[in-house]
Image (tube, rainbow, N blue to C red):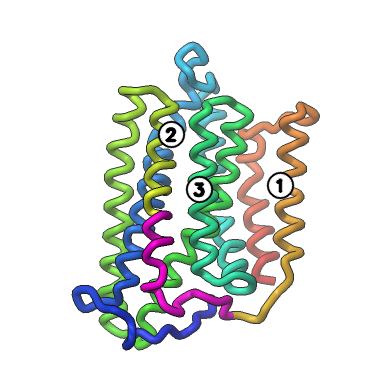
Amino acid sequence: MSQSVAPAVDQPQLFGHPRGLATLFLTEVGERFTYYGMRAILILFMVDTLAKGGLGLDDRTANAVYGLYQASTYLLSLLGGWIADRLVGQQRAVFAGGVLIVLGNAMLTLVQPTVFFSGLTVIVLGVGLLKPNVSAVVAQLYPEGGARRDAGFSIFYMGINLGALVGSWLVPVVAAAYGWSAGFALPAIGMALGLVQFRLTRHYLGGAGATAPGRRASWWPVVVFLALVGTLALIALAGKIKLDPVAISAGANWIKIALVAGYFA
């Protein structure tokens, strides 16, 4: 991924590191809290009975949905990185991704099957935008490279672990005590808080990730992709086709290989 050079010397410092690192640290804490917290209750919700507010899916189908969700967040990072590098810049991609993650998790709180799977799709798109680009901005805070950048990434990765640890523990506790809607609401709140502090302290990032560093590209690939996803979702919601997560999961490896090959080509 291409990187623009940010003037680190003139940036405010905090404990020997650019002040912007704290902005990205807290953003990543919120995103990983949301991601791992929701993931901790995802299968449990899907296999829970309808009488208890779950989806009533069998174990095999629930695991297939879970696997597709996990894989898609990584696969969509390719598109998210391309959008940032060619269209909007990393900072805008991080913010837009956070908004989608909040919206997707808010949709999950309704605990209705059609809205639930749409919410998962929105979350996947959001993670694909945010996850690769927030790390890219960290690198751009240290244009000089070296041991200082390594130390900065070590601090940043502590944020990943902190958010994952707290989310994986707290969200299931809240879901068990107050129900599935509350369990899904907490991750939405976590990402919203991370997003608010990102917006308020974004100026500390300076020029790091503010503009697209690569050759300007067209929005058409993104528009076509979203149109395909939206059309498929509408057809599925209308009951015209029945999507089988188990069958999709079985062929997903070949689909991913083809998509990755096409991306790099």
First in sequence: mark 1 or mark 2?
A: 2
First in sequence: mark 2 or mark 3?
A: 3
Residue corresponding to mark 3: 101
Residue corresponding to mark 1: 229
Residue drawn at x 76%, y 27% as measured from the top left: 239
- For mark 2, does the 10 Å Cα neighbourhood hold few (<14), some (14 to 19), or many (20 or more) residues? many
Q: Is residue 176 magenta?
A: no
Q: Is residue 200 magenta?
A: yes
Amino acid type at mark 3: Ile
Amino acid type at mark 1: Val
Residue drawn at x 19%, y 74% as measured from the top left: 15
Residues at marks 2 and 3 touching, judged by CB atoms closer than 8 Å: no
Q: Which mark is residue 184?
A: 2
Report the span colored magenta: 195-213
First in sequence: mark 3 or mark 1?
A: 3
Q: Is residue 174 above or below residue 96?
A: above
